Image: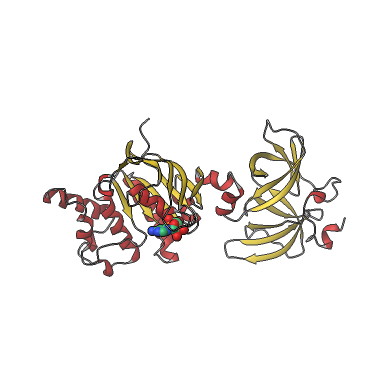
Amino acid sequence: MHAPAVRLAGVWKWYSGQQRPAVRDVWLEVRVGELLAILGPSGCGKTTTLRLIAGLERPDAGSIEIAGALVAGSDRFIPPEGRGTGLVFQDYALFPHLTVEENIAFGLFRLSRAERRQRVEELLRLTGLEPYRDRYPHQLSGGQQQRVAIARALAPRPSVLLLDEPFANLDAELRQRMREELRRLLRELGVTVVLVTHDRDEALSLADRVAVMLEGAILQVDTPERVYHEPKTREVARLLGQANFVPARVVGAVGRSDLGLFALEEGRNTAVEQVELLIRPRDVVLEPHSDGLGVVVDRRFVGAEVVYRVLLRCGITLETSQPPSVELAIGDRVEVRCNRARLAAFAGSERIGLAALLERVHRSAADSVRSSGPRDEAPAVSEAD
Ligand code: ADP
Ligand code: MG
């Protein structure tokens, strides 16, 4: 096992005059060759974390290692140029008076003329910037500027590339395309990357692992699938996307909800308790059913799919995206069937796992969850049985 590309251990950063620390006890390991995305809302400490790794800020506590070498600690601080990191700023920070070629060559002052020339050619080729080598930044599109910034950061062969909100300055259409291009480029280069973003689609689609950050702290580090479907806390669940929480009552090893009966993961205690199932918009299938426990209360066409709001008997309104083949009208009664083999549920702050659906529940089923859920919003129609 070789050392992680970057390791942060108990890192704190408290800007003077601020009421809260910008970075709060962060422990994080970035593996060699991976693309790790730090995802969090604006102001949560993402840029500060990158600046700490790059050496543009000093931690108030904790230590930072890069490729196994201590670069910041209680009595050690290696300045940026000695760290082997390449930072791409949010606004790219290209030198306006230098051409593309000169921008890329900027950090290569230690190389001989011939070596420098060779390295610049290599990067122009890799990033597809050869035709633009003599242009100045203002003569380039946003996407091209971004590639120059990345080429400049990569030129000195950093052990880790740090990208701050790489798509923030691009318009929505370009963003999608650039994301694909950047992914291809970074995979080709095989370079270790830490990318920070507030855009969850970006983090989920680009990263090997996602570190979810909130108020200076890292709440969870996991694969995109796991942070999305198995968030450790409700906060993480909400930060990752639309989340519905449907109440279920647990008796013994069985959870009962308006989506049906579920088996609990083995080893759970058998005390009766109230849990909430995390349901993502595409986690359920709607089917017309006269005895279903849901009623369609809203329908919104959004192009590729239709977003339905379904009022469940427990009083929760579930928001779900359905394919166009599902044709329902407001007022239709539906069965809400879970289409995932495993679901996350929360009991208090603790997450528990739920296995596959055992059985469906219909209006006629005697023991409903109605008694345990909020019912103020439940309309007359749900009382029809
Ligand atoms: P993000 O990149 O996630 O938007 P930042 O790391 O830029 O967050 O900021 C984290 C917090 O630290 C914010 O509350 C911000 O206002 C504050 N902050 C950032 N830079 C400075 C600074 N140089 N001086 C004082 N406060 C700062
Ligand atoms: Mg920032």
Residue 123 pos. (x, y %): 24, 52
Q: Residue at x 26, y 55 (%)?
A: 152
Q: Is residue 378 left or right of residue 132?
A: right
For the N terminus, which image quadrant?
Answer: top left
Q: Is residue 342 visible?
A: no
From the viewer's perspective, is residue 148 above or below residue 68?
A: below
Q: Residue at x 31, y 58 (%)?
A: 147
Q: Is residue 69 visible?
A: yes
The colour style of the image is: secondary structure
Q: Quadrant of residue 340?
A: top right
Q: Furthest residue to the front?
A: 17
Residue 230 pos. (x, y %): 58, 44
Q: Residue at x 48, y 59 (%)?
A: 42
For the C terminus, which image quadrant?
Answer: bottom right
Q: Quadrant of residue 82?
A: top left
| Total tally of numbered discs in the picture | 0
Q: Is residue 96 left or right of residue 36?
A: left
Q: Furthest residue to the bottom?
A: 139
Q: Residue at x 60, y 61 (%)?
A: 305
Q: Quadrant of residue 289?
A: bottom right
Residue 12 pos. (x, y %): 43, 46
Residue 56 pos. (x, y %): 32, 52
